[in-house]
Amino acid sequence: MISWRKHYKKGLVAIGLLLSTSASIYAQGDAANGEKLFKANCTACHALDKQLVGPALGGIVEKVKTEQNLDTDWLHKWIKDNKALRASGDKYANEIFEKFNKVEMTPFPNLSEQDITDILEYTSNPPKPAEPAADAAAATDANSFTAMEQAKRDSMNGKVIIISLLAICGLLIWLLVRLRQLVKLQQTEELEGLNATRATSFSDLYKKYSYVGKGILTLLAIFAAYGIWNWLMWIGVYKGYKPEQPIYFSHKIHAGINKIDCQMCHSSAKYGKVSEIPSMNVCMNCHRNISEYQGKYFEPGKDKAFYDAEIQKIYAATGWDAGKQQYTGKTNPVEWVRIHNMPDFVYFNHSQHVVAGEQAIINSFNKKNPDAKIDVVCKACHGQVDTMNVVQMANDFTMGWCIECHRTTEVDMNNGYNKEYFKNLHDKLKKQYPQTEGKITVDAIGGLECGKCHY
Ligand code: HEC
Ligand code: HEC
Ligand code: HEC
Ligand code: HEC
Ligand code: HEC
Ligand code: HEC
């Protein structure tokens, strides 16, 4: 009898241990949260291991400590508002600004101290990359594929470990409850009765306890279903995906520094379902005259010769002879690598968002992000493209992402289209939901209906 109790205690200790390991996973969640924040806010300009627009940030805490004798307090100030820090006359802040050709880093006043601590934790202790699946990497374009795999794994590993641990705990608790019932039984007169049903051989035992096995199998099945669901949810998702392009075309130089309107090149966004990549003729409208780069901005690591050579590629592609100022007729189509690509079963229409939804989306985005206001509707979904030398996916572009915005964005009932089209509906909804004072989010006009987004 005593031995039963002993086991019971041991069981409790085991559960305690398991719970504490899962708790410690949560504690390390800082770096994971930091990674998320880093990817959302910083990867446009920083990488951990190499210089992009800004310096490499791997081990930055250690670096400013040893090289500049500055502590994390300085980093917090810099990240929150580097401009203010420079204005305060801080020596190192001004030094590094000069060193990077006075390229301004975005201030991040909306990041909390904890957020910044998390980001710094990530730069000091980035999670080790998992081994890429050898066969998968070989099968597809190596870089982009592994980056995508990595993103998937990172997000799944943590969840799977925690859920597995919880499941194991559950199993243990259940076993202990059973044991305790047995202990109680032993203490009663029913012991006799129990003895009668006692297993006498291994096969008896199996028969009696096969439900344990079944239980485990069921659990495994649940895990598998969970894994498959996760995998499905990640189809086509590559936030941060930025492949190498045949011409090094910089959005920062065009849309940012030279303030060329997005729609000058992506004009079809306004009228159609897709927002196309401009043809080489559009480039030639300007580059017939701009054959050299004479800008002051240089992305670290690039020089005038590099940009000039890239501009020459436009001439090679269109068969333009700059010396004779005429086309030779020999063309070489440029094959841009597509970055955004929804699965075929999804219907997404740019004009619905860029024309009908424009004001609604801008207003709602600016209300949600008072510190990162946008002027151009495209940025609500594509991020600050005009600061990116290389475009990358700024959001997950999952179903959940579409729906989240539809739930929270108020439709602009006063734009010409909706005023006309939805007048009756609007009045009806106003009566139906008086508490919303006639405020109507996209879900109310059908933005959550499966058929609107799926063929
Ligand atoms: C628009 C581009 C841009 C973005 C976005 C950006 N940075 Fe920077 N960052 C820079 C540049 C450029 C510098 C170099 C100093 C300068 O020119 O102002 C820099 C410098 C830094 C430094 C100082 C590094 C050193 O060597 O001392 C830190 C730390 C830093 N950034 C952190 C961040 C973090 C964290 C984020 C995201 C929350 C971020 N940055 C987002 C461009 C950017
Ligand atoms: C001077 C022409 C030009 C201007 C202006 C321009 N783009 Fe682009 N855009 C391109 C070209 C060329 C590509 C394809 C190469 C690449 O991905 O960088 C592209 C690619 C993109 C992509 C990725 C497309 C894909 O493959 O999924 C997005 C998103 C995008 N642009 C958004 C914008 C936004 C937003 C603006 C305004 C802030 C803008 N562009 C301004 C020429 C332009
Ligand atoms: C509305 C005018 C305009 C259009 C259209 C345009 N560019 Fe440019 N491009 C510029 C300007 C301005 C510069 C910067 C020149 C300078 O600062 O001396 C530039 C610079 C460049 C450079 C060197 C810097 C960099 O981004 O790497 C490349 C390459 C380039 N353009 C490619 C293209 C391609 C490809 C297209 C068509 C998809 C295109 N441009 C369309 C105006 C334009
Ligand atoms: C409501 C979100 C949203 C807004 C606003 C938006 N886009 Fe997009 N954009 C997307 C989605 C989603 C895709 C992927 C579409 C696909 O793969 O079928 C995309 C794809 C693109 C592409 C790649 C070509 C294509 O159509 O697949 C370009 C270029 C682009 N967008 C440019 C723009 C420009 C320029 C604007 C502003 C005028 C803009 N987008 C506004 C969500 C948006
Ligand atoms: C940034 C916010 C935002 C995001 C993200 C977004 N939408 Fe929308 N969407 C809107 C707004 C606002 C409208 C309403 C436009 C109007 O006034 O008619 C809308 C309307 C629509 C409609 C028409 C609904 C109807 O009943 O008329 C469809 C279909 C749609 N969106 C599909 C998508 C898909 C697919 C995605 C994801 C790939 C997506 N949207 C992502 C804001 C968004
Ligand atoms: C606002 C647009 C929108 C609405 C409404 C919507 N979906 Fe989706 N759905 C998407 C997008 C975008 C994807 C592709 C997501 C991706 O690539 O990860 C998707 C993917 C899916 C998938 C594939 C699994 C996955 O998540 O990738 C299924 C199944 C699905 N949707 C079912 C539904 C059902 C059922 C409804 C109605 C209750 C619905 N959807 C309503 C936009 C929508």
Image: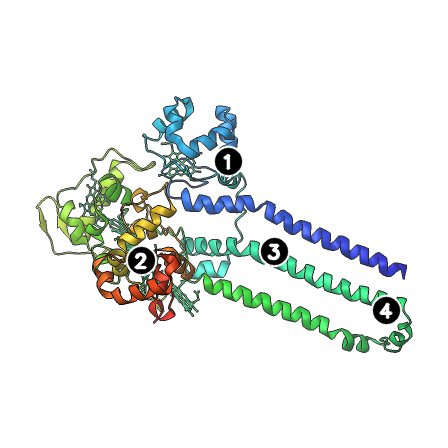
* Residue picked out by circle 4: 185
Quadrant of the drawing holding the C terminus: bottom left
Indicate the amino acid at tag 1: Gly
Task: Of the two numbered discs 4 and 1 on the same chain, state the one appearing first in sequence.
Answer: 1
Asked if disc 1 is less than 8 Å from ligand 1, the answer is: no
Q: Position of residue 166 (x, y in %)?
A: 65, 58
* Residue picked out by circle 2: 411
User: How far apart, in angstroms, are the residues tagged by discs 3 and 2?
Assistant: 40 Å
Indicate the amino acid at tag 3: Ile
User: How far apart, in angstroms, are the residues tagged by discs 4 and 3?
Assistant: 35 Å
Q: Position of residue 444 (x, y in %)?
A: 36, 64
Asked if disc 2 is less than 8 Å from ligand 5, the answer is: yes
Crowding at dot 1, Cα within 10 Å, few <14 / some 14-19 / many 20+, comes out as some
* Residue picked out by circle 1: 59
* Residue picked out by circle 3: 162
CB under 8 Å between discs 1 and 3 = no
Indicate the amino acid at tag 2: Val
Task: Of the two numbered discs 1 and 3 on the same chain, state the one appearing first in sequence.
Answer: 1
Give the answer, above or below, for where 446 lies relative to 319.
below
User: How far apart, in angstroms, are the residues tagged by discs 2 and 4?
Assistant: 65 Å
Residue 96 visible at all? no
Which residue is located at x 66 percent, y 50 percent?
21
